[in-house]
Structure formats: C-alpha cells, structure tokens
Image: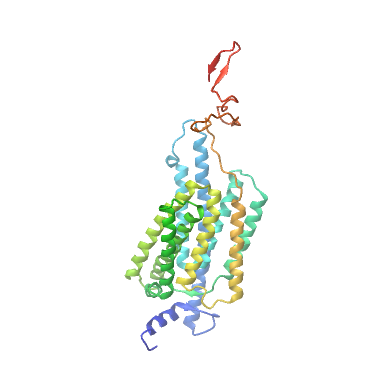
Amino acid sequence: MAGPGGAALDELARNFTYGAPGAGNGSLSGAWYRRNEFHLYGVLLAVLGNLVISISLNIQKYSHLQSAHQEHARPSFRSALWWGGALLMALGEAGNFVAYGLAPVTLVAPLGCMSVTGSAFISVMFLKENLRASDVLGMTLAFAGSYLLVNFAPNISQAISGRTVKNYFVGWQFLIYVISEILIFCVLLYFYKRKGMTHIAILLTLVALLASLTVISVKAVSGMITFSVTDKIQLTYPIFYIMLIIMIASCAFQVKFLNQATKLYSTVAVVPVNHILFTTSAIIAGIIFYKEFLGAAFLAMFIYFFGCSLSFLGVFLVTRHREKEHLPQSYIDLGTIPGKQTLDKIQPDSNGLSRGTLPDGSDSTKSPSGEKKEV
C-alpha cells in the first residue's frame, strides 16, 4: 500500500479480522479461529478469576470474625487464614490480568459482576448470612446479563503488538479522549482538595477516570506479553514500558481514592457505584482506544448494553440494604457531645458485657439504703 499512512493501515489490517471464518485465505481463517480460542480462554479466566476473588474476600471476612471472637484478639494479618485469602485474591487478579491480554476489554470488564454476586452466594452458603429475595433476583439478573454480553460482545480478533499499541497511543481519538479525561479529573480534584467536597460520586468518578487508563495499560502490557509468547518478542518496544509505568501509577492512585471512599461511606454504597462507574469507564476505553466496536451491528450493540444494564441492576440488588457485619464489642461507645448530656436509653447488646447508660444520664446506681454507688 503506497503513501505515508500505508504502513499503519497495513498493520491495522493484519491485526483485525472481521466476518466469517471462511472469508479470505487459509492463514486468515486459521488466525480467526486462534483468536476466538483466545477469547474463550479470556472469558473463562475472567470468570474463574472473579470467583476466586469472591472466595478470598469471604475467607478474609471469616478470619476477621474468628479473631474478633477470641479472648485476646490479634491483628488479622498475623492469621494464616487471612494470608491464604490474600494469596487467593492475588491469584484471581492475575487471572484477570491474563484475561485482558486474550479477550477484548468490553468482554472482560463487565464480568466483574461475578465477583460481587459470587461473594454474596458464598456468604449465604458458608458464613450463614441471610438469603433475601433481592439476592436471588440480583444474582439471576447478573447471570442473565453476563450471558448476553458474552454472546453479543464485539467479535473482533485483534493481536496486540507493540506497533499496534504505539499507533493507537498517538491516534487523534485517544489524544482527544485523554485530554478530556485530564480536564475532568483536574476539575474534580479541585473540588475535592480545595473545596473539601467528598461526595461519593466525586471520589468514585476520580477512581473511574484512573481506571480507564489502568484498563488500557493492563491490556497493552498483557497483550504484548501474550504476543511475545505466541509470536514475536514485543518487550523491546519502549511503548511496553510506558504502559507498564501508567499501569502501576494509575493503580496506586486508584487505591488511594477508593480507600478514601470506603472510609467515608459504607461498602454497601461504594461497591455498586464503583462497579458501575469502573465498568462504564473500561468499556468506553475499549471502544475508543482499541476500537472494539468498529464494524459491530446495531442489534448486537443494543443487546450487549442491555446485558450490561442487567448486570448493573443485579449488583445493585445484591448489595442493596445488605446489613453490615457488626463485630462483638465489650463496651458501648457513647461519644461525647460538648455542652450536652446523654439522657436517652441505649439498647444493650446481648453479646456485650455492658448495658449502656441509665435513663437519668448518670453513671451510678442506688443501693437499697439510698446511697449512690459508682458503676
């Protein structure tokens, strides 16, 4: 192909495969089948990885509950059970990392709902938590949505080479996208830092904006490693190390803002909002940077987004009004209100040792002789 842009277009044509497997020559057909096998492996790894993460979360939760019931409680990180959960979580995240290198972002990212619904199911089965009607409905919707988005996700076979990532990185679509993200991020960061606005939408939108860069870089790094294993070495391209730095930095700042959100708000509020914003941001990143919806039919796109909506609704129903675990305490902390006296009754904890304050607001009781005794 002649012209200054011929090399880039040739590279794009070599890395994309459309249509039926019989179209084109035999090598193209073989590549189509091989890339679809990779898609299947990516989906399986994503589902298994998210299920392993849900198991790890429940193991760590059980470790916290177990240590709280001990007479001399010790930090959870000193428990072998807690470390087992941490190792399982690392294994699940590694599965997700590899899945991004094998399958499209728009196929892997929405499957994160399996972690939330799987965790709720395991909590009911092994931690004996209550099974609510909203849990059953939410799990059903999440599984139905996952089935739709897996079957109607963009069927574009794409090999992630160093040259492909470099061409995408300097493309005008991504430049406009990343400049817009930086502007929005700076505005939200100004309201968060200067104005002291800590609304959950601001914090989790900051997380989602960083997540889009994380997803782009994770797929680039994982895809180039996969390409190096199956074809030619790609680790000599400078773009690989640029993406690696972006991946590490964006992950670190994501954790910072997400921890801030979990300190200010309950996990019941953080989990569904974070899942929806993260998944939406990842899908947009896959569409713009990796052009994963290029040539997709309108009906397939509609059913795909309908499946995403079902999974979002399922996650919301599973986490909605879920009671938080209260660890047993040996006392009731009333807090102090300057200039005021606490006179209200406090319902005592049947598992605790104390009974709260008395109706008259004092911390003393009267003996039969009428004298006050300190409690």
Residue 246: x and y in percent read: 37, 62
Asked if residue 44 shows in the view, the reply is no
Which residue is outermost to the bottom?
A: 2
Residue 96: x and y in percent read: 47, 60
Answer with the quarter of the image where residue 289 lies: bottom left
Location of the N terminus (image quadrant): bottom left
Is residue 367 rendered to the left or right of residue 8? Answer: right
Depth check: give the residue in front, 21 or 292: 292
Depth check: give the residue in front, 304 or 370: 370
Answer with the quarter of the image where residue 242 lies: bottom left
Is residue 183 rendered to the left or right of residue 333? Answer: left
Q: Is residue 7 above or below residue 293?
A: below
Which residue is outermost to the front?
A: 339
Q: Residue at x 66, y 55 (%)?
A: 137
Which residue is outermost to the top?
A: 369
Q: Is residue 371 above or below residue 253?
A: above
Q: Residue at x 46, y 74 (%)?
A: 158
Report the number of numbered marks.
0
Residue 182: x and y in percent read: 41, 64
Asked if residue 38 shows in the view, the reply is yes
Residue 245: x and y in percent read: 35, 62
Answer with the quarter of the image where residue 309 lies: bottom right
Which residue is outermost to the right?
A: 133
Depth check: give the residue in front, 182 or 13: 182
Depth check: give the residue in front, 127 or 333: 333
* Chosen colour scheme: rainbow
